[in-house]
Amino acid sequence: MGYLPTELFHKILVFSIIARSLQHPYRGTARALRLKLVSKAFYHAFQPALFESRVLDDFGSRDSLVFWPTRRHYGGDQLWHSYLIFRVHNETDPNVGRFVDIRQTARELCDLTGAPYDETAAGLCRLLLDTGTRCPGKREDWVDSDGRRMDPTHPRLNLLSAAAYFGYLDLAKQLLADGCCPTHHDLFPSAMQLAAFAGHADMVLLFQEHLPPIDDEYTGNAFSDWKVNTGLVAVEGAALRGDVDMLRLAISPPSRPELRESHFSGLDLGNLDYNTNGRLVLVSALLMTGSWDVMLYIRSLLYSIYPLDAARLLKETAQRGSKDIVQRILDDLDQWVVEEYINRFTIDPLTFATRAYHEDIVELLLERGIDPNEFNKIDRETPLSAAAAVGSMRMLRKLMEYGANSDGDKKQQILMLKRALLVEQTEMVNFFYDQGLLSRKCPESIREQIKEEGLESMTELLKRWG
């Protein structure tokens, strides 16, 4: 770099990133990210060049940042947040992603409230980490975590969501009077959900007063009537916040005195259809929260339903990196698991924790006796193949220390080798061969794939092994 002008070095790095990313829709960009490790000069100059290249517009995150407030991302959320801010500040074409929409909402909010623009734009971008990791340059991919798309019911609906998140009560009142609905969403989550998530109880109370009236055909079933008349999205916001008091407010609105938590707590909800909105929202809240107290509270409402799917709860918390929650569930296992789901319980948590690179949770699960040789019967994923996919020698060795092996399973051995090669983990590939875990002969199909994807270092490594 000392021999090149800074501007020229920057351009060379930009085009190097683009060239690498063109090799493959996902792995090419991942390879481009590794340029950061070439030298100190590359490390410090990399992020501005990456952002200017725009390759992240079409990259998309395989493991989206769903429920980002309660997940450990090891810097991934910071990178995406910085990129969204960069694109919001610099994009001029309204047909590229939703960057111009975000900027316009931030500017309008600042004009009406006097808030600082940079902080406002950054705050709105943080709300969009999940959506913004789904190929952010493609307008059609800006949908919520369930892939749902709703046409905006009001041109200022996004402004209401922003006002709810930042706590501008007077502006929210004006927008409600103008016809905005607090339970509908467009670019941002609904105003009701964001008010609960941000902890603005006065805003939640305001929105509850503007909910539709209770249906004339009131059934008398507190749970089924509650599900459509209390603003269910506030439940999800409160769960993400990890706030039991806010959750109680969301479930038992003062404006709905006939609908109270005590009316449906402990009801036999197991006979309800699985797709019942009220049940799905409470189960979703249980899965997304990072608060043990919130989990216990929701469990008290759903005790007749949720023990049947405790495996999913443990898998989700292990994948998010919530070690304290995982440990508490394991300590309290008889309250969550029933016999028929033990098999699922032994399979999913360890594999998903490994996929997400949570070494401490992998170690915890192994210490608690989770079998490291179980595999997911849908895609035959094992903890070992997951460790190979993320290129972690530490987790691989830890799994093997507790008895994980691929003895006699040629398909698993080939899968492990392929994944280690695709992430260019030289140490791992050599380890597989040196330990005799894999055949000395690499399948020709893998050799061809490695060559086609331009993984020169891995091609040379395979030559060494014949």
Image: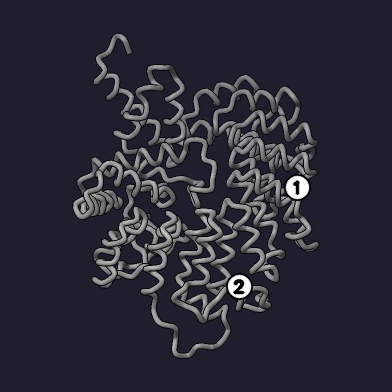
Q: Going by the image, does 448 lie left or right of 394? A: left
Circle 1 or circle 2, nearest the eye: 2
Q: Label 2 sits on what residue type?
A: Tyr
Question: Foreground: 396 or 145?
Answer: 145
Q: Give how far across and how far down residue 278 sits, in percent.
A: 54, 72
Residue 177 percent coordinates (x, y): 26, 72
Secondary structure at badge 2 equals loop
Relative to 335, say whether 419 is above or below. above
Residue lying furthest top: 3
Give the number of the disc on residue 274. 2
| Residue ID for mark 1 | 374
The numbered disc on residue 401 is none
401 and 420: which one is in front? Answer: 401
- Name the residue: 29% across, 23% down: 10
Whether residue 315 is visible, yes or no, is yes
Identity of the residue drawn at 28% across and 51% down: 102
Q: Is residue 327 above or below residue 220?
A: above
Q: Amino acid at mark 1?
A: Glu
* x and y percentages locating residue 255 in the rendered image: 44, 76
Residue 283, picture quadrant? bottom right
